[in-house]
Image (tube, helix red, strand yellow):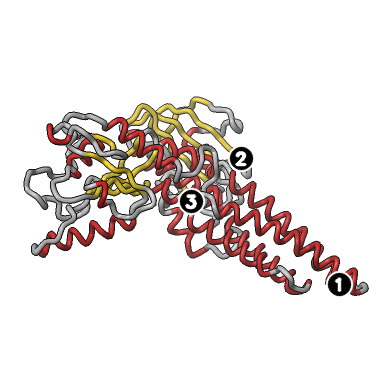
Amino acid sequence: MSGETIFALASGRPPAAVAIIRTSGPLAFAACEAITGGLPAARRPVLRTLRDPASGGEIDQALVLRFDEPKSATGENVVEYQCHGSRAVVDALLGAMTSLHGLRPAEPGEFTRRAFANGRIDLTEAEGLADLLEAETESQRRAALIMAEGGLRKQVEAWGQRLVDLSARAEAAIDYVGDEDETLADETVLADEAQALAGELDEWLARPRAEPLKEGIRVVVAGPPNAGKSSLVNALAQCEKAIVTDIAGTTRDSIEVPLNLDGTPVLLIDTAGLRASDDTVEAIGVTRAEGQMQLADILLWLGDPDQVPPHPVTIKVHAQADRAERTRAPAGSMPVSATKGVGLADLSRRIVAEVQGMLPADGALALNRRQAQEIGLARDALAMAAGTDLVRLAEALRLARAAFDRLSGRAGVEDMLDALFGRFCLGK
């Protein structure tokens, strides 16, 4: 890194019971001596009085922790101060650090970026940590934690070691001048092992991806006007998200409502009623509704069950089931009354059951788009090695290794690092 020493508030905004200020870099220990009068033993929290080095005035009493490079969160010398979390105390301590030569405030994600640059974590772990910080549901938390703790890194290292071994054997076979039968045997064995690895990568690429887990499964509520779509959306969201009136065509545009259903992320989408209309605005809304139905992962259909549009995952809903003329639900439809609450729990459970089948299994690693792309490139390179000579096989193995280097962040990822670490807060 640049050699600069950085500092930032690593806990939540004050006021709070406790605030944590983190410093990292070559002058972190010198700053600690200037502020506390001494340097504590490594990894042994001590209570110290914090003073402004310029004036000598007392700032606060705090627990001080020291972590020596390279065995720290960033791979550099790190000191953390756990002080009282008032705005005045935090501002005074940050001001004292600002006055010290060689220290500057950290940029968003700079601590984690230094951990990546110093080899404490790889790019997949950094991505998992970013997802963990943004997790809003239990399933998102579990998936992000597996990635942040090195689940994919360990798998990529195992794949990479196999590739290195294959590459070494291929290069040795190229250099060895044997008879034709020996050369053919080498080619066959190496190509078979490369194809076996390609098949393993194919299995990983077939797994459910991380994007639906992060963004939510798209559940689109569709049907004719006045079918009870908006009322159902409000009932499932347990708040007034959509306008409900007796006037047909009230909903003119799509309304997206993120939900957490039993720890699973759902994006519930209300749509305009489907019908032919001379009203320009309503016609646009109908067109958008049709587009949302095409993008839906799950379609909640509130219209005539015999007129349900073709969709791979459809839940037929018999809405307004509290009305006297609608007490009997058609076969295969779920009776629901948004106003009375009838059937809402059963419908929620049905949605959750369908959603869980589309998300990664509990405890399974889920690849994001970038990770899947690099694994796909490695798979494609290995697949091309089938039936080729040793020289082409060695080149295919090199291309696969390059894809894994980009996957872990060892090469070719500079253009996306700013975007990734910009997702982090100042103290992370």
Which mark is on residue 209? 3
Q: Nearer the viewer, mark 3 or mark 1?
A: 3
Q: N-terminal of the two: label 3 or label 1?
A: 1
Give SS at disc 3: loop
Measuring 53% from the left and 43% from the top, which residue is drawn there? 148
Q: Which residue is mark 1?
A: 175
Q: Amino acid at mark 3?
A: Arg
Measuring 64% from the left and 52% from the top, which residue is drawn there? 156
Q: In terms of depth relative to the viewer, which is nearer, 367 or 384?
A: 384
- What percent of the width, then of the height, locates residue 360? 49, 44
Q: Amino acid at mark 2?
A: Asp
Calculate the distance from the C-alpha at mark 2 to the C-alpha at mark 1.
Answer: 47 Å
Q: Quadrant of residue 257?
A: top left
Looking at the image, which residue sits at the far top? 47
Q: In terms of depth relative to the viewer, which is nearer, 222 or 85?
A: 222
Q: Which residue is mark 2?
A: 68
Q: Quadrant of residue 260?
A: top left
- What percent of the width, then of the height, locates residue 93? 39, 38
